[in-house]
Amino acid sequence: MLPVIVFLPAAAALALLALPRRVPRTVFVWAWIGVSAADVTLVGAAWVGYDPRAGFGWTENTAWIPTVGIRYHVGVDGLSLPLLAMTAVLFLMAAVYSLRETRRVRSYVCLFLFLQTVSLGLFAALDLIVFFVFFDLSIVGMYFVIAGWGHGEAARAAALKFFLYTFTGSLALLLGFIGLYLAARPHTFDMVTLIRANPLAGRGAYGGLVLLAVAAGLAVKTPTVPFHTWLPPAHTEAPAAGSAILAGVLLKMGTYGFVRIAMPMLPGQWRRYALVFVVIGVVSAVYGALVALAQASFKRMIAYTSVNHMGYILLGAGAAGILAGTSAQARSLAVTGAVTQMVSHGLLTGALFLLSGVLFDRGHTYDMAAYSGLAGRTPVFAGLTAVAAFGSLGIPAMSGFIAEFQIFTGSLASATAATAVAVLGILITAALFLRALQRVFLGPLRRPGTPAAFRDLHPAEVASIAPLLAASVAIGVAPRFLLDVIEPAARTIITLVAR
Amino acid sequence: MAGGAGSLALASLPDAARPWLTVITVGVVLAAFGKSAQLPFSFWLSRAMEGPSPVSALLHSATMVAAGAYLLLRTRPLLEASGWGAPAVAWTGAATALALGLVAVAQTDLKQLLAASTCAQVGFMVLAAGAGGVAGGTLQLVAHAAVKSLLFLAAGAWLAALGTRQLPALRGAARRYPLVGVTFTIGAAVLAGLPPGSLWVAKDELLAAAWHDSLALYAAGLAAAVISAVYSVKAVWYVWQPVPADAASGYDTERRGTRRVTRLMAAPLVALALPAAALGIMAAPAVAGPLRRAVGAAGEVSAAWWELGVSAVAAVIAAGLTWWWGARPAPVPVAVLAWLGRWLDLEQVALVLLARPTLRVARALAVFDDQVLDGAVRGVARGGTRLARVAADADDGGVDRLVGQVAAAMRAAGRLARRPQTGQVYMYYAQAAVVLVLLALVFALVR
């Protein structure tokens, strides 16, 4: 099941590359939509067939490079299944949105299909090297998306920065993985074995260095302050679908790594340095929100809110490592909230980046000062943006609230001061989103360039953005279907961290 | 959750352990004050009056603003358990009722007057929650909702018809539209606390709890009740004045009026005027008993007959004096009046203390982010390329030059070695002879 889900897009990409060039461009996009829809269905089937109490499900384990003990080991649990589903949905929506893409569509579609395999593969990986391979390949795919379909010269500079910065991070990560490998007896890269073995228990400085390497690698990818400066240019210069995937899926590879690898494989070290992660999380949350508040570009602003949202995840994960003064229930709540936040941020920020793509498509600038009063001309665009913005600032009845509420409730007892400060981030986010909505959509109508028609959303745009928001509302109103899967896994993580 | 209550039920809040009990109380109280526009958060309600009148009627008087007071009435056990919560809430409510009552008196805009009076009236509910008059507070909440919706809708009807909400411009508005005028007057009379209106009873019910608590609290509440009579009657006085000759010059300042009050606009006024006047019945013993049991306040004190009498007399005197005073300027310094008119400058304070510094910090951090953090990254990148250039120069000028020199030397040696290869036999003989001689010499010397 999992290998099919993971490699179906890559196989489709190979098949599409074999097609002659004169095939009309819509064929490629529709093929992508078909493959993604099949993937969504398959992930749905995997979800239905997965028993949350059973630990890892749908596992496959075959030898890959036996000389160094690298196995193709994949499987899902309550941490990875929601992210797999979110990834599949987001790629489907990016595919639908790309119906409007006209530039070099064949390579564009194949590149995204490649990225889809890479992203799904990472969340299914149960071997550190398989994880690392996908982690690294995601950088390659995204580099070409930004450089090839971005906005000109600046895009190539941003792509270069993105590649080199995150590549540095992934090298640090590899170093950490090798550290784990060498510590385990017998040497292994297998995640399940490493989690069970806890190879660095009581290994003082060595364990600290391995955590440092792993955390630095993941922190660059996530990104957290101060490793985040590759993110605004990469997001701003990437095409809309690329930004949506970058923010929605690629950033999650970092945060997912924290709960999948750092917490259960290095529990002693995680507990020891939990406060560091809490502080980094809070600084990211408040600092990201404040810097976002000062942005003039709509897309750059959303990019910085990602730093804010990722900060909450780190806060929850860090708080789960502080055992004093808290209960297992609270810590499990924090981890559940962190994983929910990953899903929620993927849906909402994905939608927001697609919407910013609409803005650029119509007005050819992200500068909010260039727009005013668009709500009268484009009510659907304004409505969906408002829903996405309110969801992103954590309004109840949407997924962001479910996530952030759990993170704060779970973190308050163990990291009281930090949580109190982090809540300010919500207030600032609310202020910045409302200011942006007012500037762009309310007031007298003003739009850049020629007074040509500023068209409302195209059906393909509605069909790509509205389902993301609908999913967020579904999680916000009836979150049980999601939490039932996440909670057992979160409890497992808590037990593993506490050992 | 952190306090070990293990549940988020409202009823389990008082069971939380200290110091979390304090944290919970602070959170609940601040949230309620913000939602209910109590001091010092009152100013937002003034700005919310830009919204349409039905919105003001529903949200800003009946439901949304009252939600904070409702929360406090609901969590009265928490306020009690915290120790400091109940008196703090009671006094904030009393202070809001007093201060925002004065603000209401100073307004010349009808909707602003009603908004400030909403803060003041909700202040009574908050006072009730703090002083332990949950039944009185609930009665106040219900009665005020009917009255204030009525008044907002009447103000909206005039705004739609005459295009203004300025009190001086609304002179004679009640005479032009008598139905609106009469229903407005009923509402204002109830708001003034005149007997036998519902708010008269409600206020005395909750002030009875205050009396039980402390005399000062009761006095503050009574003073606030008197002030509510003043601002209510002030509005009524304006709308019942004779229509001035140049009335039309004051119209249409906010929007173009239609000069009509439609039946659809009038119907809710009548529908609201009845409960506004009649809800006082809820304090009658037959109804009050079940109501008290319903809100879980069976043991609370009720208003004594003399308390009802005192407040009735005070309200009537205040109303009479206000009517007699009319539009003459208030006997306070102009600066104070203007300060009250600006809602105590609370918005300015929030802007100066919170909003502007936050924005300034945000901009500074954005610059920091671009210049310092990203600058460092760019610096590393620049350093990398510079290092690369140095390495490239060293490579070209050092290593590669050496390689080139070695190659050149080899080439020269090769050229040199080609010299003797002439292909002529006598030359080879000569060379062999020279080499033999040299070898013999070397041999001889080494021996």
Image: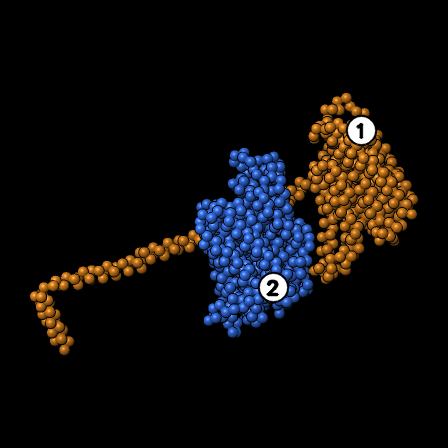
Chain colours: A blue, B orange
Q: Nearer the viewer, residue B356 or A185?
A: A185
Q: Nearer the viewer, residue B394 or B56?
A: B56
Q: Position of residue B321 (x, y in %)?
A: 84, 32
Count of labels shown? 2
For image coordinates 76% across by 47% down, the residue present is B67
Quadrant showing the N terminus of chain A:
bottom right
Is A278 placed above or below B135 here?
Answer: below
* Three-letter code, disc 1: Tyr
State the separation of the CA atoms marked 2 and 1: 70 Å
Please indicate whether residue B43 sits to the left or right of residue A134 in the image. right
Q: Nearer the viewer, residue A421 or A2?
A: A2
Element on which disc 1 rests = loop
Please indicate whether residue A209 sits to the left or right of residue B158 in the image. left
Read off the chain for label 2. Answer: A
* Three-letter code, disc 2: Asp
- Crowding at dot 1, Cα within 10 Å, few <14 / some 14-19 / many 20+, comes out as some
Please indicate whether residue A65 sits to the left or right of residue B210 in the image. left
Query: Residue B191: in sight, yes or no?
Result: no
For image coordinates 70% across by 37% down, the residue present is B50
Of badges 2 and 1, the one in the foreground is: 2
Determine the residue located farthest toward the left in the rendered image: B426
- Crowding at dot 2, Cα within 10 Å, few <14 / some 14-19 / many 20+, comes out as many
Q: Position of residue A387 (x, y in %)?
A: 64, 46
Read off the chain for label 1. Answer: B
For image coordinates 73% across by 52% down, the residue present is B28
Query: Residue A454: in sight, yes or no?
Result: yes
Q: Which residue is disc 2 drawn over? A: A77
Q: Which residue is disc 1 drawn over? A: B177
Q: Nearer the viewer, residue A263 or A457?
A: A457
Q: Position of residue A339 (x, y in %)?
A: 61, 58
